[in-house]
Amino acid sequence: MIKINECYTEIGESYLFAEIARRVGEYKENHPDKKLISLGIGDITQPIAPAVIDAIHKATEEMANAKTVRGYAPDGGYDFLVNAILKHDFLDRGIQLEADEIFVSDGAKSDTGNIGDILSDDNWVAITDPAYPVYVDTNQMAGRKIELLPCTPENQFVPAFPAKTADVIYLCYPNNPTGTVLTKEQLKKWVDYALEHRSLILFDAAYEAFISQPEIPHSIYEIEGAQQVAIEFRSFSKTAGFTGMRAGYTVVPKALTAQTAQGKTLRLNALWKRRQSTKFNGTAYIIQRGAEAVFTPEGREQIRKVIDYYMENARIIRSGLEALGLTTYGGINAPYIWAKTPGKLTSWEFFDLLLHNVQVVGTPGSGFGRSGEGFFRFTAFGNRENTLEAVERLKIIHI
Ligand code: PLP
């Protein structure tokens, strides 16, 4: 007899984007003549940098030749990519890491979801709220107990320490969905907490490339002691338009240890290596060559231009919403603008209002967790024309 993982019966359907699609679909069916603009989903719209495309073409040609064709990639990534990451993202920024502490993957979703494989289901897990849904869902799939840490305007979106000492803490900065960041001092408090309580911080830095203020940390390893307590997740998805191509990486420092139930100390680096080499067969060679090109001088310059383009959209959305009298957060170091819904409207009521009155689609904040109720997420990943038109349309709303 087949016995299922009972935890799956408790987590329910993946509700948010399915419900958005349902409401949008119904509206379109009843109003086929209306043009909808989406400022909802966090996916890219701009083409991938020419330097990346050139590298991908070149790598594809290599696959057509018996002398240069490549088969299975190394589990943790090709040296050329690992060394480029190591140099540009860490050593050049004064962070000492080694190549075997970096694990190239097919993206941060898999890694933030899979990391639980090496952690006991007995861990007490603290997760900021609202949050990227993968953290809560994957821990519920494993049956772990979770404490949510509200991030709201009342605490300037800086989570307070959990009521019960957490074994594992998820932090995502720059944050999806709120677009807010932590300063070094604020992040240091969490590193100190983890050092004191022997907790693990899972630091999701998928939006690191969007940081514009020089004092904001790009990596948790900018904080002293963090290599003893933190795993960091990075992604090429938003940085360089790899959402459809799939590449990211995870840093598991060798200084980071954890205990077995018998009190034996083990390195999480060795466990993650073991996990990946068993369950993951590497990111495609062609894609890794594309990712390598992200770090070339041309690649960096081209990617910077695309990020600047999105961040100009963010500025347009932010100032448009503020001109309407809405209170907004984020949008300065992240491609997301987190707006307080007007009056006492719930997130979904505001969603319906925008859909029905101005045909603009955003994301209801309550879909990211209970502290997201009364908020709404706009993304800056649209093209300029649609972004300008959406902001123009919003002006007719009376709030
Ligand atoms: N982490 C956060 C906070 C995200 O918002 C996303 C994607 O939206 C991801 C991770 C997933 O990134 P990837 O495309 O690398 O799987």
Image: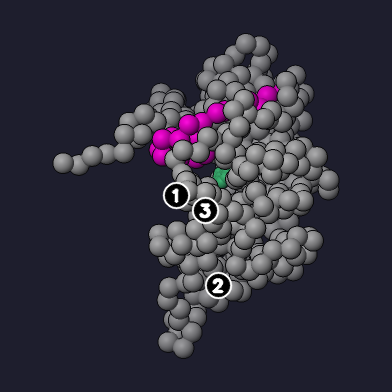
Residue 29 as seen in the image, left or right of residue 135: left
Element class at badge 1? helix
Question: Would you call the spot at circle 3 few (<14 residues within 10 Å), some (14-19), or many (20 or more)?
Answer: few
Residue 117 has which mark? 1
Element class at badge 3? loop
N-terminal of the pair, mark 2 or mark 1, is: 2
* Residue in view at x 61 percent, y 42 percent: 199
Question: Would you call the spot at circle 2 few (<14 residues within 10 Å), some (14-19), or many (20 or more)?
Answer: some
Residues shaded magenta: 134-153
Location of residue 50 by image quarter: bottom right
- Three-letter amino acid code at the position of disc 2: Tyr
Can residue 88 be spotted in the picture?
no
* Residue in view at x 42 percent, y 76 percent: 71
Q: Which residue occupies the foreground of this view, 198 or 364?
A: 198
N-terminal of the pair, mark 3 or mark 2, is: 2
Whole-percent x and y of residue 317?
A: 71, 33
- Which residue is situated farthest in the bottom direction here? 67
Residue linked to disc 2: 78
Give above or below for 352 relative to 115. above
Element class at badge 2? loop
The Cα atoms of the two marked residues, 3 and 2, are separated by: 32 Å
